[in-house]
Amino acid sequence: MLKPTPRRTRPTPTTYVAGAVAFLAWLPFLWVPLASDEAGFLMLARQWSPGGSLYGDYWVDRPPLLMWLFQLADLGPETLHPDGLIAPGVKLLGAVASAATVLLAGMLAARVAPRNSHWTAHLAPVLAAALLASPLLGMPETDGEVLAVPFVLLGVLALVTSLTGEADRRALLLATGAGAAAASAALVKQNMVDVFVLAVVLLPLSRGRVPHLRRRTAAFAGGAAAVLAVVVTSSAGLGTSPAELWDAVVTFRVEASAVIRSSASPATSQRFFAVLLAFLASGAALTLAVTGFLAARTAWRRGPRSAPLRVAALAMVAWELVGVAAGGSYWLHYLTGLIPGVVLLASLVRPTGWRRWALATCLGLTVLGTLGAWSHELAVPVDDAIGRDAEVADYLRTHSDPGDGVVVAFGRPDIVAAAGLDSPYQYLWSLPARVRDPQLRDLQAVLAGADAPRWVVVSGRSISGWGITAPAELQTWFEHHYTEQASFGDLHVWSRR
């Protein structure tokens, strides 16, 4: 067995307070216009039914459980405002996910912390709340990472708990639940396979220490398979086949990595350094370095078999770091995927002597970083890009007629959503267009087809952009059939002649 069941397994009062803080931190941003990804996911979720693309009429490289979560957010009110699409339900979804993550962090710390280390059970949820409330990690944008981390921590908690005690019905149910949570996390954001990585390392190291390990492993696998089967079957009923899902969440990511490496723009490097600076300024880097060092030192001294959870936690964190680095596009919300590993490593530290001071310093710097970033976000909640997109959307909404369509070349689904229009082009994001339509044959077919959009928004003076160079004949055809009507910064609105 990993360790006897600790006396306290319920969250501490500190955990509830930290969870409330994590939730309340989102409330001032409920009526902030949605970011590009948020608006796009909401638009896809709303219209998902059998259609001509992966999710209804649109295509995105995300798993289906994310769409269902955004369908929950779609139950709330929505406003097409001059500042953009306002949907408090989307922000509320992020707030609930953050609070749930903090509660699970407190429960996990109570479960795995060394004996008589009650201080750690207070530190872990506060650390989680500080990171989740930090705009340096993408808050207040509700994206796949923040919605997946509760499932990750739930899976970690259930897996660790299932390996304590006898292999009775409770242990097998917990193992099944761990597998289900592990699959759910990956079905929200496909790279969030943290629990599977933890299990692949932890289960073999537990051989000979945990009775009936095969039964528990089988229960874990069964839980994951059951959730996968339900989601795939339900998606097929909505017109999304298993082959299409595999293509979108696995095959496409391999293709996209090659495209990103071969055609990265200067903006990619700028975002990389922005993410690196945010990683350092948020306190996550220092906390990860300190807790990772302590876990590695303990595992080295005792040996992997005597410190299985620490070794498995280090493997999980290594995977999370790969997920941030391999994402390619380098957005701040990638860093949210590090929170489960940071929390688990912090929970395993015995806070005595200098270790306690080191952890307290990490926590203090994290809280200070969050307060500074949160205050700045509150003062400037809408960045220039979202504000410019809102101007374009407001123009389209004001000048469009019922039945009009719009294509934004390329990306910025928030413009389409905030304009209240549909797009006949299935790729609302730039990366799918770069990977799947690099010669713009699909776009040309749309523009020349029976459902050609009245409006086209381009970045700059041509239809090229975001690493895509339009063929000369397409540009000539476009200028012959469309005329520019307005410009907002580098965004130009064209209408069909």
Image (cartoon, rainbow, N blue to C red):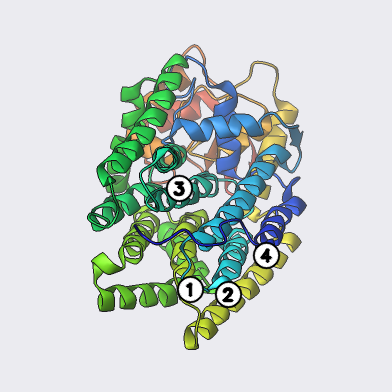
Give the number of callouts: 4
Which is nearer the N-term, disc 4 or disc 3?
4
Q: How far apart are the alpha carbons under marks 3 and 1?
A: 24 Å
- Report x, y in % for residue 220: 35, 40
Q: Is residue 322 left or right of residue 456?
A: left
Q: Amino acid at mark 3?
A: Ala
Secondary element type, mark 2: helix
Q: How far apart are the alpha carbons under marks 2 and 4?
A: 14 Å
Instruction: Write down the residue under mark 3.
Output: 158
Front residue (pair 247, 466)? 247
Q: How far apart are the alpha carbons under marks 2 and 3?
A: 26 Å
Residue depicted at 43% across the width and 26% down the height: 231
Q: How far apart are the alpha carbons under marks 4 and 1?
A: 20 Å
Instruction: Write down the residue under mark 4.
Output: 14
Secondary element type, mark 3: helix
- Report x, y in % for residue 263: 32, 50
Instruction: Write down the residue under mark 2.
Output: 363
Q: Nearer the viewer, mark 4 or mark 1?
A: 4
Q: How far apart are the alpha carbons under marks 4 and 3?
A: 22 Å
Label 1, residues with CA under 10 Å away: few <14, some 14-19, many ≥20: many
Secondary element type, mark 1: helix
Q: Amino acid at mark 1?
A: Thr
Secondary element type, mark 4: helix
Q: Is residue 254 left or right of residue 60?
A: left
- Report x, y in % for residue 401: 70, 19
Seen in the picture, residue 454 relative to 67 is either above or below; the reply is: above
Instruction: Write down the residue under mark 1.
Output: 287
Seen in the picture, residue 131 relative to 47 is either above or below; the reply is: below
